[in-house]
Amino acid sequence: MGMTDTYDVAGRLDFIGLDQAGREALRRLRPFLEVELEPALEVFYGRVRANPHTRAFFRDDGHIKAAQKGQMGHWATIVDGRFDEAYVKGVRTIGATHARIGLEPRWYMAGYAVITEALVRRMIEAKWPKGFGGRAKGGQEVADGIVAFLKAMILDMDFSISTYLEALDADRRKLAAAREVAERDQAAAVQALGAALSRLAQGELNARVDARVAPEFEGLKSDFNEAIAALERAIGSAAEAAQVVGEGVGQISVAANDLSRRTEQQAANLEETAAALEEITATVRRSAEGAQTASQVVAEARAAAERSAPVVEQAIGAMDKIDHSSSQIGQIIGVIDEIAFQTNLLALNAGVEAARAGDAGKGFAVVASEVRALAQRSAEAAKEIKALIAQSEDEVKAGVGLVGQTGEALMTIAERVTAIDTLVAEIALSAREQTRALGEVNIAVNQLDQLTQQNAAMVEQTTAATNALSGRSSNLSRVMSGFSVGTGAPASLPRARNAA
């Protein structure tokens, strides 16, 4: 029978008892089925539409109508009793379709039950006790027709379910083969991935999956390699950053320690500066007080100098009077000297006349001699007095000159004292301003000292934090040294210098 022999159609028909007579009984049912099959199928597909599970196997009502039409043709083939190659092909197509769409046998067996119930019920109602084809042969013919129909239906179910099971078995074998291949490919992929992960666990970030894997694992291989490459880049960047951080922390630590020492020294210097400023402030305050006192003393000196000017002028006047009196005395002495000269001449003449008188004139001659001697002594005394008066006049003139110079000096001193008084007043004012400014500077220096102390404390905290960060950087260096990047060199880092 061609293709049907492959599926032992003859053996199935023989075992089920659907012989030539049975097929003839089926053919006699054709007029009946042409009338009754469509209502039975309407009932069945009505249930298909009503059931959500079976309804999901169809796209729309047009799809259901097409399936119903196909059922009509298939049942027509069954009733004709043509269990040939076309029949087997159709049944297997239906079974393969059911297997492909996942329609379980319980659903189309239930369909057989629904259609069979409707047809058998109508068959008994219409043909009992009459025979088929209009000949009354009683219940035997009806029973033969029903039995043949049921056997044909069961044969059809056999082919459908067998095809479904064969399809499932073929799918199972395909799945088993695919599973075997998948397991083999999976084992290879897992082995390659495990080897790479083992190298990765040892810190080799340059580990890659280089083995050939199945296409479905190519994505996993690519993702793994890209992830490890990204991790390698990240660890490499982290290593470089940690190195930079370590070096920077070392430099910051050294700088912080230097800054701490300089800050401490600056704080000590500020304390000394504050103390020195306080001393300078006190000194300037005392200088201001001294300048004020000096200003008062200079003012008194200027007043004394101003008072001395009239005294000097009076002394100059007195010296001028003494000089004038000396001139008058000189004139008087000149008169006395002239008188002495004239007296001496008179005494000389008297002596001459006494000599002429002889003895009578001796006494007169003695008197004349005494007068002459007295006149000579007077002349000599007058000369001496004149010399003394001249000397006194010179000294008076010198004294007048000196007193004049003294007056001029006193005037100059008064002017200088006035200028000094102005300067001392300005110095006193400047000293007061300096005292006030130094007070403000002292306050600012004290505040700066406090800020410097606070900065010193902050620098100590910064140094402690830097030392802690240096320790963390060293730990990070040790951790990073366990990874290999690039050409396999370990990502070791120079240990951050801890200058603390």
Image: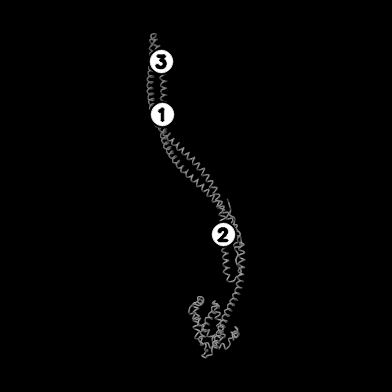
Front residue (pair 9, 330): 9
The residue carrying mark 1 is 403
Q: Nearer the viewer, mark 1 or mark 2?
A: 2
x and y percent of residue 289 in the render? 45, 37
Q: Residue furthest top?
A: 359
**Contact check, label 1 and label 2, Cβ < 8 Å:** no
**Quadrant position of residue 299:** top left
Which residue is under mark 3?
Answer: 374
Q: In this rendering, is residue 103 above or below 251?
A: below
- Of marks 3 and 1, the one in the foreground: 1
Compare residues 46 and 160 and report the one nearer the observer: 46
| Label 3 vs 1, first from the N-terminus | 3
Q: Quadrant of the N terminus?
A: bottom right
- Report the amino acid beneath label 1: Val
Query: Alpha-carbon neighbours of circle 3 within 10 Å: few (<14), some, or many (≥20)?
Result: some
* Residue placed under numbered mark 2 in the picture: 238
Residue 80 appears anywhere in the view: no
Whether the residues at callouts 2 and 3 have beta carbons within 8 Å, the answer is: no
In three-dimensional space, the C-alpha distance between marks 2 and 3, rounded to whole angstroms, equals 140 Å
Whether residue 190 appears in this view of the structure is yes
**Which is closer to the viewer, label 2 or label 3?**
2
Q: Amino acid at mark 3?
A: Leu
